[in-house]
Amino acid sequence: MMQKLTIIVPAYNHESTLHSTIQQLLRVEDDLLHHDTIGYRTRLLVVDDGSRDQTWQTIQDEHQFNHRVTGIRLSRHFGYDNALLAGLQSAVATSDVMLTIDAELQNDPAIIPAMLGEYGNGADIVAGQPVNSHPSAAAQPMIANFRVMSKRAVRALLAYKEHDLSIATTIPMLGFTTASVAYTLRKINTKKQHRARYASLKNTWDNHFANSLTPVHGVVILGAACGGLGLLALGYSVIAKMLGTTTLGWTSLMSSIWITGGILMVSIGLIGEYVGKILTETQQRPRFTIEEEIGTQEAVIRQFDKAV
């Protein structure tokens, strides 16, 4: 039995490139349909992450031209991972397999058939693996989240309820069979590269505090090291006093104050980060708010209710 595929594309201010992206992905879908790789009810779901340009209008126009193109519009900008989660949550009920890809097509859609081939061989998760990227690029959400996922893998992912959920770092925790397909990373314009680097830094920062106690351990080690240096300095001062070679001055005193004060401020800041994460989780606010949908199951149900 041929399975239904949904390709999920988060988009934020992609008015200028979205039409080209949709057309390229539709051609990939057409080829897969022609070879009976996927079912005829396959869809392309574009998630507008609160864009300030005409991204949503572009999605509506594409839907009118081809009903395989569907869309979700978030009420504001919630971030790449949350836009992906909105798309996965919408698609999981009606899809057998889901593929996530960036709106810039920095990921190469030409390897999608190979990724689906690995899925057909039994892998629940198939990741695109860029072979020409800098190691830091792996932290960029647009690159790290190019993957195929089975229905059960997506359901397992959606069971994680953290507010600031990082999909890329959560996927390995699922424990399903995984595979990868190598590809050559495409170039994007300089402005969007800077935006991707910022997203990478933010993603890395959030991941450290959401999934690791390493910063706390680092501060403990730093504090212990400074305490050891303090004891050595105390021993030196006692010996110098006994030998009568003590030199009075402000340098050592002020250095100690600044070093100790800096360590204390860093420690308080780290504690504040973790307390802030706790506050965010206890508030239990939604990860995203959907303002409008077009062509999705929920949109069809609402149209039916209005007609009745």
Image (spheres, grey):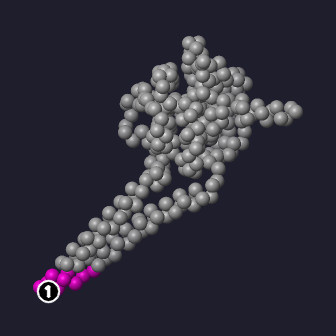
Locate residue 15: give its quadrant: top right
In the image, is residue 227 above or below residue 129?
Answer: below
Q: Position of residue 274 (x, y in %)?
A: 49, 60
Q: In the rendered structure, which amino acid carries the disc numbered 1?
A: Met
Front residue of 227 and 109: 227
Counting from the top left corner in percent of width and height, residue 260 is at: 35, 72
Residue sticking out furthest to the left: 243
Q: Is residue 285 magenta?
A: no
Rendered residue at 70%/26% (across/down): 63
Label 1 packing within 10 angstroms: few (<14), some (14-19), many (20+): few
User: What is the secondary structure assignment of the residue under circle 1?
Assistant: helix
Residue 268 position within the rendered picture, expressed as x and y whole percent measured from the top left: 45, 67
> Quadrant of the image for the C terminus?
top right
Residue 187 in view in this figure: no
Q: Nearer the viewer, residue 240 or 112?
A: 112
> Per the image, is 240 magenta?
yes
Q: Is residue 307 left or right of residue 72?
A: right
**Residue 215, horizontal then vertical, whole percent:** 40, 58
Q: Mark 1 sits on what residue?
A: 242
Q: Which residue is drawn at 19% across and 83% down?
A: 238
Which segment is the magenta one?
Answer: 237-250
Q: Residue at x 33, y 70 (%)?
A: 259
